Amino acid sequence: MASGQADGTDSGNAAAPAKETVVTRFAPSPTGFLHIGGARTALFNWLFARHHGGKALLRIEDTDKARSTTEAIDAILDGLDWLGLDYDEAPVFQSERAARHAEVANRLLDAGHAYRCYATSEELEQMRAEQRAAKKPLRYDGRWRDRDPSEAPEGAPFVVRLKTPTGGSMVIEDKVQGRVEVKNAEIDDYILLRSDGSPTYMLAVVVDDHDMGVTHVIRGDDHLNNAFRQLPIYRAMQEIEGGWDDPVYAHIPLIHGADGAKLSKRHGAMGVDAYRDELGLLPEAVANYLLRLGWGHGDQENFTREEAIALFDLPAVGKSPSRFDFKKLANMNGQYMREADDARLADLAAPRIAALEPSFDPASHRGLLIEAMPALKARAKNLDELAAGALFLFRQRPLPMDEKAGALLQGEGAGELLSDVAERLDACSEWAIEPLEAELKSMAEERELGLGKIAQPLRAALTGQSTSPGIFDVLVLLGRAESLARIREGAARAALDESAAAGN
């Protein structure tokens, strides 16, 4: 071969000619959801392309027809769209390119860089059994590499195998992992075309990357070994027709759980849709968190999309696995919620509120929800918490009470206290935060109570909960009539509880 001689060491992409336009690709297999590790790979590819003014492409590797589903493809596209990752061309579907893959395999075959292997499954199994018995690596032994095809029985099925280099080694100057060297003897003559003529993954990836003009292959480091199997195809095709330059490789470390173990569902290895639908997170928070898993810029934690594009590059990607921390993600999401547009948050929370409270009407209640958002979002770390915190605004009387709120109304003197609160607040000429706060502070001083001793049963009466936005925000959001009605109802309930307790 022109580069990758059998008797020397060659460097994977150190000598590759520079290309004018950076082209990256994200290439998921649609056999399930878009998991969080794949989402980070997609993000890194997208940011690298945008940073260098290049193109970000998407390829759906759907050659496994038994496992690839339309639902999975839709989930992947939906997840990428939710994260704000757009692509510069329509997605390429690998399954539609089988004829092109076979064409390249046949070019390799005709040029002597590949050969027909007629070994039967029984022969191969015996070969592997002997290798296991001898405690040798399980590799194809090249038994048909130099044999004449005429030796095979007429009409016998065959596969097409790549004739890989046998001596020396290959070196990849990986942009994340650094210099990585593998001896060519460790790479067997793997299959390019199966006996039914269908292409293998290893062939399809190389052909598609070349035809799509991909200059940089950024993917998980679990694919690093694949790079050494794929490079010989580039080298052989470069010799045959030219223009098959090695891509630049960047293999990013995998994501582990917070405990350092391999990422599993309990660590966060769910589909991106679960982060949206089940956890109620914002896409910008998830994207920012993924950005910080393995990449950094000083001590900065939060990045706008524009900042991420301007700053992201491969030298700042670390070599060690990142640890996924749900608590840190939740805290980051809370920060983004506090900065998010109120109308947008209201629209995102509305379906969740409707699922919890039948009396909520998204159309007629939207204005109140937007008005309440500054107070509500200050306490919430996700959309579920936001929805739960908003329920008091839309619940009908008699107000349901949670256990802690009910206990607050059972305190000694709670009924009389709330009755007094209702009278004092009803006398306020202006229903606004400052006069309401002044009135309750004056009442607390007269009774020689801390304001909290009044605010806690008042909160229970107004919201049915022991926690809520600031009590004066609650009063203003509910309005004079509804607030006073709830306080008096709470006073009556507290008095009834006190009377029942006295009777016992």
Image (tube, grey):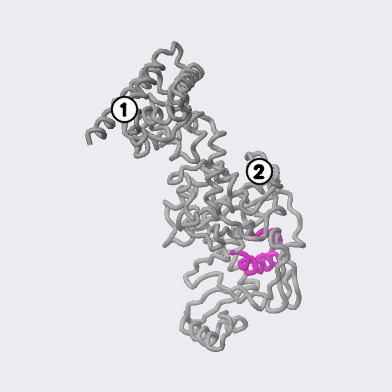
Region rendered in magenta: 222-251
Residue at figure coordinates x 64%, y 41% from the top left: 303
Depth check, front residue: 291 or 503? 503
SS under mark 1: loop
> Tag 2 or tag 1, which sits nearer the N-term?
2
Q: Residue furthest left?
A: 503
- Whether residue 352 is in magenta: the answer is no
Q: Quadrant of the C terminus?
A: top left
| Relative height, residue 301 to residue 405 (above, below) | below
Q: Position of residue 163 (x, y in %)?
A: 63, 75
Residue at figure coordinates x 55%, y 44% from the top left: 331
Mark number for residue 396? 1
Mark number for residue 308? 2
| Identity, as a three-letter code, of the amino acid under mark 2 | Ala
Residue 190: quadrant of the picture: bottom right
Q: Position of residue 448 (x, y in %)?
A: 46, 24
Q: Position of residue 234 (x, y in %)?
A: 67, 65
Count numbered badges in the picture.
2
Q: Nearer the viewer, mark 1 or mark 2?
A: 1
